[in-house]
Amino acid sequence: RFSGVQGAPPIEVFALTRRYTEDKHPNKVNLGVGAYRTDEGKPWVLPVVRRAEKLIAEDQSLNHEYLPVLGLDSASAGATRMVLGPDSLALKEGRGVGIQCLSGTGSLRVGAEFLAQILKYSVFYYSSPTWGNHKLIFMNAGFKEAKTYRYWDAQNRKLDLAGMLEDLRNAPENSVIILHAIAHNPTGVDPTEAEWKEIADVIEEKKLFPFLDCAYQGFASGDLDKDAFAVRYFEKRGFEFLCAQSFAKNFGLYNERIGNLTLVTKDAETISNIKSQITLLIRGMYSNPPSHGARVVSMVLNDPEMFEEWKGCIREMSGRIITMRKALRDRLEKLGTPGQWNHITDQIGMFSFTGLSEKQSMHLIDEYHIYLLKSGRINICGLTTSNVDYVAECIDATVRK
Ligand code: PMP
């Protein structure tokens, strides 16, 4: 029977990383995968994470017993406080709860299973374009129909707010709307505060269900509170919603799979029923989550001094990204590369949607060993002071071709 299995399509970003790794060219540049790199082009273990890991390793009171099904309470409570804010009314009133899940992906999956299987939601909407995994996660969780709402105005390289609002207005009641809470992947373009208000108005009026995906808190502005605006706004407006948090990027804990699913309800009494249902969903999926990342996150979020140090690390990462955005734009403008390049510094977060076509993107890979997604998305963190000239020159040559 195995002989009849058809090959599945490759996952673009992982296939790209493999090609990059196998490439022997001395000037190769990886602008594909969404991971932070130092100015030396290296992965970065945050010093505060190293410190926490040492303390954990030396703590004789810790062991490898199972965590509870819903994870380490101190980690999920810290994570929920971090995203909803210390003054959250939902938390004060016991209407908000956090569940430790397997990074952002696992948090989305658990939330989507809850919505599909327990609340019987069947239609979800995601932005066009979006992160390559949303559709797969929600369909595998049991949703029946995937739909898109307009988001990106390619011509003007900005948010297509009118299109987005129109598509949401036409969505059937009880559709789940996936929203990128901060630093939209792949476009790097977020709604303004006033635009979030209009989006929330339509979601409320049309009885849609918001599911916020928060994978980059701190990465956009360097300020955790500022980057949580959208999530806190939905809370203040009194919505019931879900929010999936990832600690892959802001803690650099990619492979530890630490994330958090926050649920905000209208009344505190339902929380224990919700938790009991999610307990069964998780029990049947992976039984309970791993502890290492949870211990690190818990320690850092709950210790004021380590928390401050971590915020410094976030500022360093977001600061380097902003510097590299400027560097790339400056060089393209100095070279007189045809077209406008202001969007590179206008966009926020880890990614830039360069506006390069698929053909141009493939040319950069094949001709210059610069790896990027075929949509033209680049990870700004892949740029360094030593490769930004090369990248700019190659983009220039490609655009002029
Ligand atoms: N959502 C978005 C929009 C993302 O970009 C990512 C990371 N690529 C995630 C969720 C979650 O990733 P992870 O499961 O590694 O936390």
Image (spheres, helix red, strand yellow):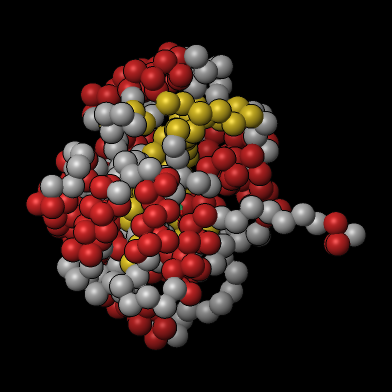
Residue beneath the point at 45% across and 33% down: 128
Quarter of the image for residue 272 reads top right
Q: Is residue 310 shown left or right of residue 43? A: left
Q: In the rendered view, would you say 170 is above or below 263?
A: above
The image quadrant of residue 226 is top left
Give the farthest residue toward the left.
334
Residue ID at (16%, 51%): 332
What is the quadrant of the N terminus in the image? bottom right
In the image, residue 352 sits, relative to residue 142, either above or below, namely below
- Could you say which quadrant of the image residue 392 lies in? bottom left
Question: Measured from the top left, where is residue 52 in percent x and y?
Answer: 33, 75
Residue 169 rendering spot, x and y as whole percentages: 45, 14
> Is residue 101 visible from the viewing direction of this image?
no
Q: Residue at x 43, y 64 (%)?
A: 254
- Classify residue 279 as left or right of residue 335: right
Q: Give how far across and how far down residue 183 sits, in percent.
A: 31, 44
- Residue 71 lies, in percent from the top left, at 53, 59
Outermost residue toward the right? 1
Q: Residue visible at 56% across and 16% down?
A: 172
